[in-house]
Image (tube, helix red, strand yellow):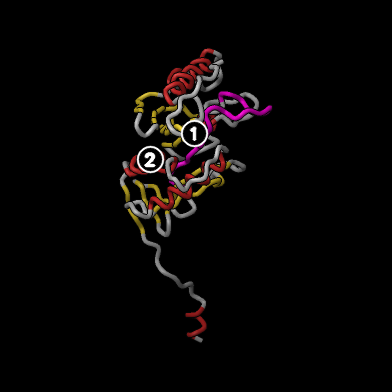
């Protein structure tokens, strides 16, 4: 019967489609950076130190913040499987919410991360399996933050990525010097894939908000370079200073 045939057809609302210029990705990164200090200073935020808990908090806060901006078409998710590399998980990703977003010639559905985000505590937490240079590179495992992007283990299909640094001691400026010094150490040690081009530059430091951002353009195995936005936030309570930890 005709009624039966009609009943077999799928039904539902059409998904809205949004078209964004390539520069919109930078707008999304700027949004994340602008919310870091507001999230940290939220009086209702429970104090946390663990990376996964901090990232989960930040994810929830960003989702709340998008509702009052023109980014309400975006939803943030934590611990999302990398769509390209099996067994890998992205710490934090923004994706379309109830729509399809076109950026240039690339289509993003609700299953597609728009920007891969890696989160790291600075300094690396102590532990027998941990390494102090985990923000950049690890020797025992491929768990270094920048290393994951450079090897293609994270964001292999993306032109830009983000690294969020939860600075717990000593200071934002000391970490810029330390990270760049480590990049040079890896270069001099002739670690495959590392060069002086991997150092961070183009930075700004917001003293009042206790945040900083830097940029790096990093070579990538088997792909074009990836631009990484490094967004750092001082997570120390108040403005109390801390003694500098050893760089060695």
Q: Is residue 130 in view from this perspective?
A: yes
**Of the residues tagged 1 and 2, which is closer to the observer?**
1
Q: Residue at (51%, 36%) from the top-left corner?
A: 119
Name the mark on residue 166.
1
Secondary structure, mark 2, is helix
Distance from label 1 to label 2 (Cα)?
16 Å
Of pointers 1 and 2, the one earlier in the residue sequence: 2
Total labels: the figure holds 2
- In the image, the segment drawn in magenta is 113-133
**Which residue occupies the foreground of this view, 230 or 22?**
230
Q: Residue at (47%, 41%) from the top-left corner?
A: 116
Placement of the C terminus among the 4 image quadrants: top right
Residue 79 x %, y % = 55, 45
Judge left or right: residue 190 versus residue 103: right
Residue 127 x %, y % = 66, 28
**Which residue occupies the foreground of this view, 138 or 12?**
138
> Is residue 119 found inside the magenta-colored segment of the image?
yes
Secondary structure, mark 1, is strand
| Residue farthest bottom in this picture | 1
Disc 2 crowd rating (10 Å Cα; few below 14, some 14-19, many 20+) is some
Judge left or right: residue 151 versus residue 218: right
| Residue farthest top in this picture | 188
Q: Residue at (55%, 21%) from the top-left corner?
A: 192
> Is residue 203 found inside the magenta-colored segment of the image?
no
Residue 94 x %, y % = 44, 47
- Name the residue beneath numbered marker 2: 29
Main SS class of the magenta portion in the image: loop
**Which residue occupies the foreground of this view, 41 or 99?**
41
């Amino acid at each position: 019967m005709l009624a039966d045939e009609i009943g077999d057809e799928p039904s539902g609302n059409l998904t809205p489609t949004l078209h964004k210029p390539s520069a919109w990705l930078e707008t999304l990164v700027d949004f994340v950076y602008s919310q870091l200090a507001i999230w940290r200073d939220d009086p209702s935020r429970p104090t946390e130190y663990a990376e996964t808990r901090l990232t989960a908090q930040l994810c929830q806060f960003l989702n709340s913040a998008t509702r009052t901006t023109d980014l309400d078409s975006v939803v943030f998710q934590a611990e999302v499987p990398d769509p390209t590399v099996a067994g890998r998980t992205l710490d934090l990703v923004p994706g379309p919410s109830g729509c399809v977003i076109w950026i240039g010639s690339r289509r993003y559905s609700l299953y597609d991360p728009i920007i891969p985000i890696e989160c790291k505590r600075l300094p690396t937490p102590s532990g027998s399996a941990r390494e102090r240079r985990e923000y950049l590179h690890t020797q025992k495992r491929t768990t270094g933050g920048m290393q994951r992007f450079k090897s293609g283990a994270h964001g292999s299909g993306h032109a830009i990525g983000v690294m969020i640094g939860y600075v717990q001691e000593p200071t934002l400026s000391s970490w810029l010097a330390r990270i760049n010094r480590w990049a040079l150490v890896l270069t001099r040690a002739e670690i495959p894939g590392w060069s002086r081009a991997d150092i961070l530059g183009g930075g700004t430091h917001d003293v009042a908000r206790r945040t900083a951002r830097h940029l790096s353009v990093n070579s990538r195995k088997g792909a074009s370079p990836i631009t990484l936005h490094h967004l750092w936030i001082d997570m120390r309570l108040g403005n109390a200073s801390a003694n500098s930890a050893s760089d060695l």
